[in-house]
Image (cartoon, rainbow, N blue to C red):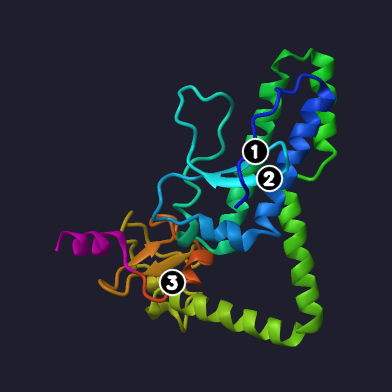
Amino acid sequence: MEIAAPVSPTPRTVEDIFKDFSNRRNALVRALTVDVDEFFGYCDPEKENLCLYGYSNGSWEVALPAEEVPPEMPEPALGINFARDGMHRRDWLTLVAVHSDSWLLSVAFFFGARLNANERRRLFSMINDQHTVLESLSERKHGRDNKSGVQNSGKSRHSAKRANNDVQTKKSRPAAVDDAYEDDNEHSETLCGTCGGRYNASEFWIGCDICERWFHGKCVRITPAKAEHIKHYKCPDCSSKKGRQ
């Protein structure tokens, strides 16, 4: 984690605001790429609501939000640490990147509130010529994936195929449908434990390992990506019953 930057004079001109934007953006990109392991470690879900700050001197920090209300300037997304262990790491970093881009724009136009229309247009054009935090994160990820694919193409394809098959078999449809899932009418009695909707092979389903009921993934907020990392799924009802015991 970087040390918090000292308060700098409020940028006034288009050039000053753009320089401030670029420095903050570069800091956030570094936190999510080069310093990602350090950043990940600071986002402990057991801590209070944490934010990722990028500062005008090019440093970054994971810290609690400002206590003053209203804050001196726009604040980053609150509580980024809470979702860290509930999502695939790549998906979580992507979510943080999207919120970081939103925050960067809000700060830039907070400083640019007194600019005239032409100056705001010029500022946005300069900002738009830079890659977003999300684009920078995606480019770095794709670069690693392409390099890995060239070196281990056979193994990677086999592993991915086997993993996808395992998830599809175990998590995406009821066991009774495994051998003939194309025939929806034969298995029309399988109902979602949340909404009561009938089974449809075109939708993602997940089964509870406790009560053995099946659910639409969307009804219990489980995506196929999340399901890949769940060894034993427990539905909301079974989870709440354990909490009451």
Tag of residue 47: none
Position of residue 47 relative to residue 119, above or below, is below
In this view, the residue in front, 28 or 94, is 28
Measured in 3D between alpha carbons, the distance from the residue under mark 2 to the one under mark 1, in whole angstroms, is 7 Å
Position of residue 32 relative to residue 129, above or below, is below
Report whether 90 appears left or right of 166: right
Give the mark nearest the N terminus, 3 or 2: 2
Percent position of residue 167, x then y: 50, 76
Residue mark closest to the camera, 3 vs 2: 2
Q: Amino acid at mark 2?
A: Ser
The image quadrant of residue 129 is top right
Residue of label 3: 230
Measured in 3D between alpha carbons, the distance from the residue under mark 3 to the one under mark 2, in whole angstroms, is 36 Å
Residue of label 1: 5
In this view, the residue in front, 210 or 2, is 2
The image quadrant of residue 221 is bottom left
Residue of label 2: 59
Q: Residue at x 65, y 38 (%)?
A: 5
Q: Residue at x 45, y 64 (%)?
A: 200
Q: Residue at x 63, y 83 (%)?
A: 159
* Quadrant of image for the C terminus: bottom left
2 and 1 marks in contact (CB < 8 Å): yes
Give the mark nearest the N terminus, 1 or 3: 1
Q: Which residues are magenta?
A: 234-245
Position of residue 152 relative to residue 118, above or below, is below
Q: Amino acid at mark 3?
A: Ile
Q: Amino acid at mark 1?
A: Ala
